[in-house]
Amino acid sequence: MRFELYRDGGGQWRWRLRAQNGNVIADSAEGYVHRTDCERGIAIVKDSASAPIVDMSAKIAGGG
């Protein structure tokens, strides 16, 4: 996998995470004015590996 850092059409910085097969599996979902802020977003994703998995299907199906 690799993170790609790039500028969008509006000149803002964005990132995307590509799997080995080339598919994009995550992206920044927002543009950043400063490259350093975009790099900080990548670092947050990298550091979130220990985040818990929450199964929301029961909450959605049960209405609460």
Image (cartoon, helix red, strand yellow):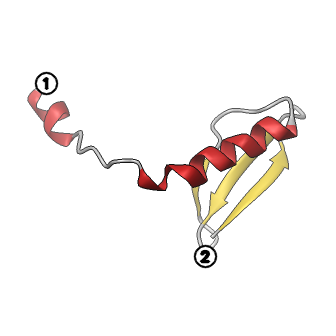
- Badge 1 crowding class, 10 Å Cα cut-off, few under 14, some 14 to 19, many 20 or more, is few
Residue 15 image position (x, y, % from top left): 72, 48
The disc placed on residue 63 is 1
Q: Looking at this view, is 1 or 45 the one in front?
A: 45
Q: Is residue 51 left or right of residue 55?
A: right
In the rendered structure, the answer to whether residue 30 lies left or right of residue 39 reads: left
Is residue 28 visible in this depiction of the protein?
A: yes
Mark 2 vs mark 1, CA separation in Å: 37 Å
Q: Residue at x 59, y 76 (%)?
A: 21
- Residue 9 visible? The answer is no
Q: Which residue is drawn at the image coordinates 75% and 33% (left, top)?
A: 31
Q: Residues within 10 Å of mark 2 (few under 14, many from 20)?
A: few
Q: Secondary structure at mark 1?
A: loop
Front residue of this view, candidates 47 and 31: 47
First in residue order: circle 2 vs circle 1:
2
Amino acid, disc 1: Gly
Q: Secondary structure at mark 2?
A: loop
Total number of numbered labels? Answer: 2
Q: Looking at the picture, which amino acid does disc 2 mark?
A: Gln
Q: Which mark is residue 20?
A: 2
